[in-house]
Image (tube, rainbow, N blue to C red):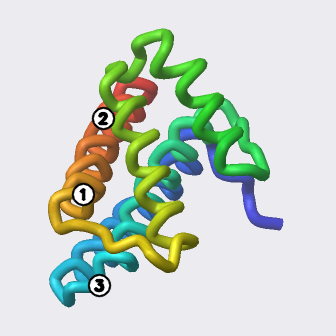
Amino acid sequence: MEEEKTSIEFAKYRLEKSKEALISAKLLYDNNDLIGTNNRAYYSIFYAIRAVLALERVDFKKHKDVISYFNKNYVKTENFPRKIGSKIAQTQTVRERSDYDDQYVPSNEKTEAQIETAKELIKLVEEYIDKKQ
């Protein structure tokens, strides 16, 4: 039987998924697929959040619950800057519109902001995990 991963290893695994999704987002952006970019950038952010929650072995079935828990326990407590909470909310809105609103046409600016938020959060999560080791 395979040995269970430590919380740190599990968090790092999830952070790698986040980085892979960001790579995909950049490739899609370079190919002018803004809707696909918004989706993958959002998932990069979502996986980064789940990396933080992995340190506690906490998880939820619904995205809104994952994000709500992160905001309540990490942003409100200022383990992460408050501005990142606002940026995450914006990325969630853009992703939902990109994925579900047939009339939505994403702008380059909003799509670039998705990528930048993912990069910023990944850096913050890496620093947070490093402190926990």
Q: Is residue 39 above or below residue 122?
A: below
Secondary element at image label 3: loop
Dot in front, 1 or 2: 1
The residue shown at (25%, 63%) is 111
Earlier in the chain: of badge 3 and badge 1, it is 3
Instruction: Give me the disc on residue 124.
Output: 2
Spatial CA distance of label 3 from label 1 is 13 Å
| Amino acid type, residue under disc 2 in the picture | Leu
Q: Residues within 10 Å of mark 1 (few under 14, many from 20)?
A: some
Q: Give the residue pinned by disc 3.
A: 33
The residue shown at (21%, 85%) is 32
Q: Give the residue pinned by disc 1.
A: 110
Secondary element at image label 2: helix
Instruction: Give me the disc on residue 63.
Output: none
Residue 84 point in image, percent of width and height: 34, 31
Earlier in the chain: of badge 3 and badge 2, it is 3
